Image (cartoon, rainbow, N blue to C red):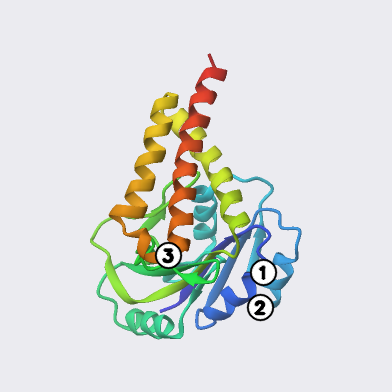
Amino acid sequence: MKLSVIIITKNEAANIAACLKSVAFADEFIVVDSGSTDGTVELAQALGARVEITPDWPGFGPQKNRALDLATGDWVLSIDADERVTPELAREIQETLANPRADAYEIARLSNFCGKDIRHSGWWPDYVLRLFKRGTARFTDAAVHERVVPASGQPLKLQGYFNHYPYDNLDALINKVNRYSSDAAAMMYGKGRRTSIFGALGHGFWTFVRIYLIRRGFLDGKHGLVLAVTAAAGSFFRYSKLMFLAEKQK
């Protein structure tokens, strides 16, 4: 069974080499880059990846579908540049593809924030559908928070997991929250969603309660508190931006 790995990138020079080396067992590596200026493209090519550069940015879902359309393997593994396949997961994937019992598989992610593995706060096990038979699934067209949707059948779960390194520092988290909240506000506006300042406050408060209390973020110590507060701020920003966007369009 031929396996294609697909990755989308922009300025991922700090991550792309380790990411690609963790999937060295695959048969094909497809990288779709949206204008990196830090050497990401050259690093990926040096490690044997086929790199396609796109002049635009259509959003995460459409960009990942572009990468998917370039894959030629029987199976596809979608991985982000800040993720790593552990040796245990690599062996499990190879064993699974030798005798598949489903057309799609979900894989857990163990995410690290500022040097600490986060096992609460809704971050673990964080299953994502990433391994699937080509032709049986596609990504949604969402600009953010895209996901793989199988055409039919129930995906199974693998035992192994990705190591995920999304934020080396708090600046990286804050920058992503700001960028994602803008994209999410635009997407909600396009779907006819509207809100008020009280709605923004309510969403922010509920996000903090859900992450810090219900999902036991307090067990992640100071890291959990920072994550809960930042997520609450991100929710508040998202709905505040939606409110102002609606007012601007009147």
Q: With 30 as the anchor, is 127 left or right in this view? A: left
Q: CA distance from mark 1 to mark 3?
A: 28 Å
- Label 1 amino acid? Ala
- For marks 1 and 3, the one nearer the N-term is 1
Is disc 3 placed on a helix, strand or loop? helix
- Label 2 amino acid? Leu
Q: Which residue is mark 2?
A: 47
Q: Nearer the viewer, residue 159 or 150?
A: 159
Query: For residue 205, which quarter of the picture?
Result: top left
- Location of the N terminus by quadrant is bottom left
Classed neighbour count for the residue bearing mark 3: other residues with Cα under 10 Å, few (<14), some (14–19), many (≥20): few
Q: Which residue is mark 3?
A: 221
Is disc 1 placed on a helix, strand or loop? loop
Is disc 2 placed on a helix, strand or loop? loop
- Label 3 amino acid? Gly
- Residue 75: horizontal and vertical position, in percent? 41, 70
Classed neighbour count for the residue bearing mark 2: other residues with Cα under 10 Å, few (<14), some (14–19), many (≥20): some
Q: Which mark is residue 14?
A: 1
128 to 2, vertically: above or below: above
Q: CA distance from mark 1 to mark 2?
A: 14 Å
Q: Nearer the viewer, residue 90 or 54?
A: 90
